[in-house]
Every structure is written in structure tokens, then in C-alpha cells.
Amino acid sequence: MRVSFKTFGCRLNQAETAKQEALFQANGVEVIPFGNPVDICIIHSCSVTQRAESECLRVVRSVKRKNPDACVALSGCAVESATDERLAQLGIDIIVPRQDKERLAEIILCSMDIDVSASPTTVTPSFSTCRALLKIQDGCSFFCSYCIIPYNRGAPVSRNFNECLDEARAFIDQGFQEIVITGCNIACYTDSKKRLPDIIEAIASLPGIGRVRLGSLEPAMVELDIAKLIAGSDKICRFLHLPLQNCDDGILKSMKRHYLSDEMGRIIEEIIETVPDIALGSDIITGFPGESDEAFENTKRFIERYPFSNLHVFPYSERRGTAAVDFEGSVPHIVRKERAQELIAIGKEKRAAYARSWIEKPVDLLIEKFDQEGNARGWSGEYLPCRINGIAEGQREAHLGKVVSFDVESVDGEVLVGCASNVQHPS
């Protein structure tokens, strides 16, 4: 019996797929790469945009056409947002709704008369990369006017604190040196009196941990406490991704965000004061309904004012099922794209400048692979691509998958470059 997965979207989806793969394997089912002949094919979908949802459903149709005898299942956000009529047209064998997604493997195997009574109650997922994704919570209740996710994933639910630590220990035992904390809205994490800073600190203190990286962090909630943790730890990546979405107060109110630009400016300044060399990322939407030229200039000035090194900018796209789809003041598509391109260009300049600021300074690198020239490749804790030249072939296996430190000698575009002679070797 063989199964394959096609996973769309965010790290949270990837973490959920890894868990389900482990459950299938625990029941004796072989997991093979997507695109090969299988008995079961599962599409783990994304619907953050209308386009993303349509692409997921297109793949479902294609898979069913190419594998008519396979059991084709659909899980993820598109199950909640796509219309029943649209789903019925696809000929899907099994649709797994949100409330049943933890039982996905059980539901599918039982439908095929496979006994899962002896299935383990807990399994630890594995990953094909050098980093592990640790899901600590799911759901969001902010209901921003542009976002479908609260409707698809429901209210926030946090995992048990000790259960998360046990999974993190298992990842370390498997050899993972970087653990990425992920969820739908991780800033909402709470288990009894434990909050997000508590679980980050606990994981960063585990024996054998290489480093801990945070996923996207909802602004104006816990980032100041986390900045203090980063300042006092060499195990927590010096990177915070704060999805501001916009920096004009009128648009922020229309988006139903829970902060204004001045507040975020003060928070960012305090973060920089606490961790002077921190890398800051953000998501920005251009051309939201009602965004005037002046409103866009407010966002542009805010981005120019602060040292963002990783900007994800995209033009607004209407999402059926959200409040904003009915807002007045639609911005022409060409203007949305032009504004996005302008901010993307600013973001690239800022990223290159941030990369240059690391010349003659030490950074840590998770070595994920060696390229054809034998150079070590991976990402720094600050989420910059790195290249180390000259690691001898006989030493590469010992370095692969390890976090090492090296002094940056030069920058190639945005890539931090060093050589083997200044690498601190893994123990």
C-alpha cells in the first residue's frame, strides 16, 4: 500500500502533512513522492487566496484523471471555503473537514478496510530537510477583513506545553538542529499559564538543540518579550517576521488590524534597541480597497524608515467569503501591481544593505547541502542565504545538517560568503 501527499501553502500545512505521513507509516503504508503511481493520494490544500484555492482544486482534478483507481482525498483549508457544488464536480473519494483532520489517516485507511486498531496514539513526524516544523497551535479569531483563515481553521487552540517539548526532544534525537515554531497565529499560544515566550525559552534550553526559529508573529502582542529572549540567548534565531499588512492608519482600520502605525513604530524601535542587529521581516498588501496615493506613501515612508531585511509584498486580491470583497474604493489592478513593485524594489535594496552589514562579523549557518562546486549552502539565523567555500570533501558529511559559525568575508548579492578556514567546526 502506497500513499503520496501534495501540500500547498504555509509551514503549518507542511507540519500537518508530516504528522499524517508518520501516521500512515506507523500503519505500514509506504509514503512516496507525489507524482508516482499510488493507492492513496492526499491533497493538503491552501485557500489563503482565491488563486491558491483554484490551483489546489485543479490539481485534485488532474490527479483523479491520471489515477482513476486511486483513493484521492482532499484536506486543508479549501475543504472549508470551496462550495459544495465545486467540490462535488471533482470526483473526490474522501473529503476530510477541519474537525476530522487529526484523524485523516484513520478515516482513509478505515474506508479501505485496513485495520488501524493497533495504531500508536502518538508519533513524531520526520522531514526531508535539515529543519523540523513544530506545530504549537492552530486557529485564529482576529477576523481581519481581508482574511479567510479564521473561517477555515476556526478559533485558536493550543497544544499541550509538555507535549510540544516532548516532540521537540524527539526532533533533536532524530538529528534536527533547527526547530521552527509554527502555527496559524503563534502569538496566541497559551496552555494554562504558559505563553509563547515560555515555550520558546523551554525549547531553546533543551540539550542538543542547535537553534530555534519563529514563524510569522502577529504584531503588537508578544514580540517585545521575545526580543528580550533573543537578546539573552544564542539559540534563538535573530529574526522576527511581523506581518504588518499595511502602514497607513486608515487602511489598518479598514483591515480590522489591532494596531496603528505609531504603535508599531515604537515597538520596532524598542526591538532594535533590545537586539541591534536583528533581522526584521514583514508582509505588506498594496492596493487594498480605499488605498489612496497618500495612504500608499504612508506605507512607503514607514518601510523606508525601518531596517526591514525580508519584505513579502503582494497586491491585494479579492477573496470570496471575506468582508473586504464588498468594500468600496477598489484600486485598479495595474496600480496595485505598480505599488507592489515599488515596495519590492525598496525591500531588495534594504536586504542587500543588511547583508553587507554582516561583513567581518560572525554568523551561524545551518548547512543544508553542498552545491556542485562543493560549497556549503544554507541560511543564517537572520534568514540570509550563506555560502562557505573550501570545506574538504572528507569533512562535508560531518558538517551536513549542523549549525556552524563563520566570519563573513564578503557578500555576493545578498549571499553571505566565508571560507572553511574561519569555520567553527561542529562538535
Image: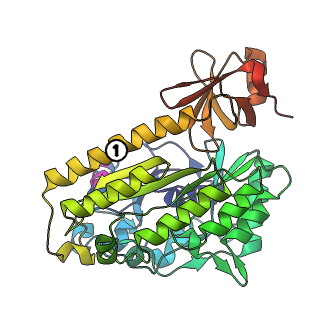
Give the prevailing secondary structure in the magenta stretch: helix
Q: Nearer the viewer, residue 369 or 406?
A: 406
- Give the extent of the magenta segment: 55-62
Is residue 420 in view?
yes
Secondary structure category for the residue under label 1: helix
Q: Nearer the viewer, residue 126 or 333?
A: 333
**Image quadrant containing the C terminus:** top right
Task: Name the spot of residue 39 as percent of width and height, x first.
Answer: 46, 51
In which image quadrant can residue 403 be found? top right
For residue 24, say whether it is visible: no
Above or below — where is 207 with respect to 415?
Answer: below
Residue at 70 percent across and 57 percent down: it is 230
Q: Residue at image x 63%, y 17%?
A: 374
Residue identified by numbered label 1: 344
Instruction: Judge whether residue 57 is colored magenta.
Output: yes
Q: Which of the two residues, 25 or 175, is positioned nearer the viewer here?
A: 175
Amino acid type, residue under disc 1 in the picture: Ile
**Residue at the image position 45 percent from the left and 62 percent from the top:** 243
Residue 406 position in % (x across, y down):
72, 30
